[in-house]
Each structure stands twice: as C-alpha cells, then as structure tokens.
Amino acid sequence: MSEFKRVLVTAALPYANGPIHIGHLAGCYIPADIYVRFLRAQRKDVKFIGGSDEHGVPITIRAMKEGVSPQQIVDRYHGQIKHSFEQMGISFDVYSRTSSPVHHETAAAFFKKLYDDGLFEEKETEQYYDEKTHTFLADRYIIGECPHCHNPNAYGDQCEKCGTSLSPEQLINPRSALSDAIPVKKKTKHWYFPLQQYEAFLKKWILEDHTNWKNNVFGQCKSWLDSGLQSRAMTRDSNWGVKVPLPDAEGKVLYVWFDAPIGYISATKELTDKWADYWCQEDTKLVHFIGKDNIVFHCIIFPAMLKAHGGFVLPDNVPANEFLNIEGEKVSTSRNWAVWVHEFIKDFPGCEDVLRYVLCANAPENKDNDFTWKDFQDRNNNELGSIFGNFVNRTFVLMHKLCRGKVPALHAGKLDAKDEAIIADIQAAKNKVQAALENYRFRDALYDVIDLSRKGNKYMQDKEPWIIAKQVSADPEAQKSIDNCLHLCLQLTANLAILINPFLPSTAKKMLHMMKVVDKMLDWENAGKLNLLSVGYSLRAPEILFRKIEDAEIEAQIQKLKSGSAAVATTDAPTPEIVSKAADNSSLKPEITFDDFAKLDLRSGKVIAASKVEKADKLLQLQVDLGFEERTIVSGIAQHFDPETIVGKRVVVVANLAPRKMRGIQSNGMILMAEDAEGKLVFIQSEEAVAAGSKVS
C-alpha cells in the first residue's frame, strides 16, 4: 500500500427501517473495522465512512406498516443502528445519514452535473400504478410469484427466497404491496443513465485491471458485463427522498441506488473540509466493504457514475462477503429469523468481542456460511477461553508465582531449541497476519493469531516451569530456565495484544491494563519484537479475558429464535413486507388442461456424477443416467446438497425440456424437487425397482 498516500474505507449504508442483525456485521462491518484498525495501527492516513440509508422503499414500507411518517422511522432506527455499531466497536470516523441537508445538496448537485452535461436519457414509459392509492409503484412495492422458485411473495426487484434479481414484468400475478390491488400500467417520465455507454470502460477497468478482486465479486461483474448493460432509471415517483433538481420534476426523487453511494461523499464532507483529498486525489486508495447483494451497485453503477461525473477516484477493491445464515436457515427479518445486535448486547453484556471473533472466524468470505449458537459457545469456550485466554492467564499466574510478579530476565546463554523455536514463531507471526489482512483474508489472519497462542500453550507445556521450580532449591541455575520460559511467554503475550487488537479491541485493552502499558504499544511496528515488556517491570494480576458460556444460555437463545419466528408466523394481520392472502390456494399456478400436462415427458433417472459449477454458488452439474442415454443437467440445488451426497440418487427428470445454457454449460432437462415445511429441498425419487428411463405418469 506504499503507493497510496491515504486510504478511504466505506461500509455499506444500512437501511434505517429496522435494527441491524449479525448478518449485517458479518457481511461488511466487522471486516471493514478490522481492516481500518489494522491501517490505524500502521499509522496510515485512513478515514472510515459510514451512515444510514434513509431513503427508498424499505423506509416507506416500514412507515406504512407502523402508521407513522418516514422521518419518524429513520430518526428512530438511525439512532439505534448507530448505538449498536458503537457498542460492537465498529469505529467509524463518521456515521452520517442520507436525510442530512449536506447529503441532499451533494446528491442533487451530482445529478445536476450529469444532467447539465447531457448524459441522461429522458424517457416516458409505462410503469405499474396502484389506482386505489394513486401511487406509482417502485419495484419493491410490487409483489408476485417468482418465475424461478415460485415463491408467492417475491418482490419486483428480487426474490428473497432464491436470490434471483427480477423486474416487475417477470412476476406472475403481480399485485400492489400497498393495497393488494392488481396494478395497471400508466405513463410517467424519468431520467435514465446510459450504462451501456460505459461498458467498454468497465470491461477494461474490471476484467483487465482488477483481476485480483475476490472471485465472487469478479464473477458477478463479469456476468453482468457479458450480458450487456442497459440504460437504468435514476429517478423514481415518490415524495420521500432527494428531490430531482429540475423544474419539471414535481413528485420525483433520485433513485435510492443513485443517491445512497453519494452518501459516502457527503459523509466525508461532514467529517472534514479536506474531503476532496480523499475523493479526488489519485493517490487515495478507496475500498468499499459490502455484502454480495450490493456488488453490482458498487462495482458497475457507482463507478460508472463517478466516471461520468469526472474528478473522483474509483474503488481499488470491493471485498464483498456472501450471506450468513442462522441455524441452517436464511436470515428473514419478516419472519424474525435473526439475531438482533441490540438484543445480543443486552443478553451477553461484555461479550461483544466474542461475537466479533465468531463472526470473523466463521465469516462468509467465499460462500454462504452458517451461524449456530452451539458454534458460538464452542468457539468462546474452546478457542478463546481454552487456547488464547488460557495461555495469557497461565503466563501471568506463573509469572507472579515463580518470578515475584515481575518480568524476568532473558538469559541468552541458556536458550534451548524450544526457546529458539518460539522466538521464530513470534517473529514470523507479524508477516503472516499482515499478508492475510492486506489481501482481505480476515479469517486466515485471525487463525494465525490464535495459532500463535496455541503454540505458546504447547511451548509452556513442553517447558514445564512449574516442575523445574521444584529443582531450584537444589540447583539455583534452574531458575534461568524458568526465567527464559516466562520472559518469552510474556513477550508473546504482548505480541498477541498487538495482533488481536484489530479483531478484538476490548480484549487488547484488557491485556494492556494487565501489562501496565499504554496504547502506543499496539502500533503495528512493535509486532514481532521481543523487548516489549522491560525486565524487572511489575505487572498486574491476571484477569479472565473470556467467561465461560453455559448450556442454559445457549438453549435460551435457540428457544428465543424459534419462538420469535413462530410469533410472527401466527400474527393475524399480514404485514406490507409480506402481503399475501391467508393460507389458501393463491400460490397455485393457473389451471391447465390434461393436454398441457401430457406434453411433459417425465422419466426416471439416476445421478451418476455431480460437481459444483465454478463461480456459481447455487448450481450443481449433474450427470444423469436415463437408461437410453446420459444427460448433463444443471440444477440450482448447491446450497441444499453437497455433490458427493447425491450420487446414486434416483430422481424424476423432465426429459423433453428445451436445452438451456447456464454458466456456459448446456443443461438438457430438469430435476423435479419438492420443498418441505422448513423451505428445504427434497428429492422426488422414483421407485428403486424402476429402471432408469422409465416413464413417470
């Protein structure tokens, strides 16, 4: 990073329509904070920018749900979100909000510059309109059946069940989220940003200049670019948001994904009058931390906007994480299937670092991962407590018992092979952790820190100073072996404080207190040194760094999660977020005739090989024996089954489905699946005795 004079780090702006949950933390906020703390420890010029996204449909939906104004919603949740971040140690330099006057001015001026430069396409189009409420419907105001997974409550921009990006036109039986009425098309005028004009620039900038980006980010960008970009509306019909700064734009606001990323710029303006140094100087490194659902906006749309405007730096990296599931299920705020941060802090006071540790150690860096309360307990008790905390505690206890509470001398002439090995481990740890952090591999970096404490435990166990202490009265020279062991263990402890600080800042401060040293010791340049604690210096008594978490606490959280979800499921009135008719036949597809059904050729098949499709988290490539031939079939079941577990499965195949290319692989058929009550896929299996290729009717 030496070629950059300063670093600007942003973390995605959360919608201020509800509290944050641990999926938010794992997705971008904890990785961003670790990275920023690492840079600060190196004395880099770094600014960490955050804020609440207070415009857009989720805000107005929440306001409608509660019968209050959008401003009341954002005022409430902005404060709660900010407080949760502070308690979790997310160390923003500024945490702003997009309802601020500075942001409205900045976003409006950005739009006006593009407009004055003649870059927008003005179009009159037909859009969905709710005649009952007299409202043009943004994509999220439209709900219908997903054409892919047939979820009856998919949104007009995305199905949150299967994750597919949608447009309202793709929904089956669309309806208004405001009134449940069937929307009609009505003409309206909007301003479109011609993304296709920046396609060549983006292809070079991403596909040639940023091949070092994470595979999930690079792959998603490539897929968008390969499919061809289209003009995208940058305004919406609404009274909530940044008003379009044109005389003929009454009742129109900026599209939330136009105005939200500009929030990074306006927040920086609020932080410092030298904001342009961080946004307009080529020697600034800009890094966006986001979740995977925001990749296209931060890697394609926002960079194209910055390029069109001119004068701004472009992101150097966008290290997006995948999603974090909870207890085997996707996070669902509408079902209350989430671990809310403000509730965690109340239930586990003083355990904020434990949550930071677990969410980093189990971070969804390359694929969706699963948070379970049992894993939370195990990592706290068995990794933080029994490895890291145990080493620090034993070191201090033995130092007080065998060295009179002071840092003992190091007797260079008495060092043995075990001493030399642990010295090498201490000196090597800094470079290993630094290399991982600089490449956004936070799980690997954290593992290396814990591994150093693991090596410290083994070193102490091998040296057995408590055994040697019994020999000192007969052989005073034996004390030198004890001194060497505990001197090196104390220097290792000091190094652990430096290395763990970006990850667990409160823990590092506790360790500083025990060692009676100031924050300056946490500077990164001190990592790897063996003279951090002076010989003869008195140290405080040890503190327990991580308390044990009991089974009863974990069981209470599991029950809380289940009961909270069940309470939502039994609520009498449907919420605007999940508008649907009560349990009836509304999810059935339109009626067909027997002749329609007779067109399907269903065959019994057997899976003889299965593998994951590269750069496609949801797809498996299957080889299916149909008796008369073997077929390649691409199936979107990778998040439900590991490839090796389904070889040998007997399945029902739609054998006469037209071939379709998926990720460059021609799929020749479809596997029929069912969905159980918990939303998990289940194979529809043919009878074991039926030969492959037999007709199913």
Image (cartoon, rainbow, N blue to C red):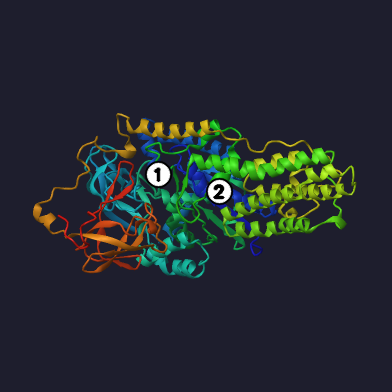
Q: Is residue 511 visible?
A: no
Q: Amino acid at mark 2?
A: Cys
Label drawn at residue 250: none
Identify the residue at image location x=9%, y=56%: 595
Q: Is residue 438 above or below residue 330?
A: below
For this view, does 263 lie left or right of residue 466? left
Q: In the picture, which quadrant includes the C terminus?
A: bottom left
For this view, does 8 lie left or right of residue 335? right
Q: Nearer the viewer, residue 259 or 603?
A: 603
Q: Give the CA separation, mark 1 to mark 2.
A: 19 Å
Residue receiving disc 1: 329
Q: Nearer the viewer, residue 71 or 364?
A: 364
Q: Position of residue 106 (x, y in %)?
A: 50, 49
Residue receiving disc 2: 360
Q: Quadrant of residue 175?
A: top left
Q: Residues within 10 Å of mark 1 (few under 14, many from 20)?
A: some
Q: Is residue 494 visible?
A: yes
Q: Position of residue 258 (x, y in %)?
A: 43, 52
Identify the residue at image location x=83%, y=47%: 483
Q: Earlier in the sequence, mark 1 or mark 2?
A: 1
Q: Nearer the viewer, residue 538 or 227?
A: 538
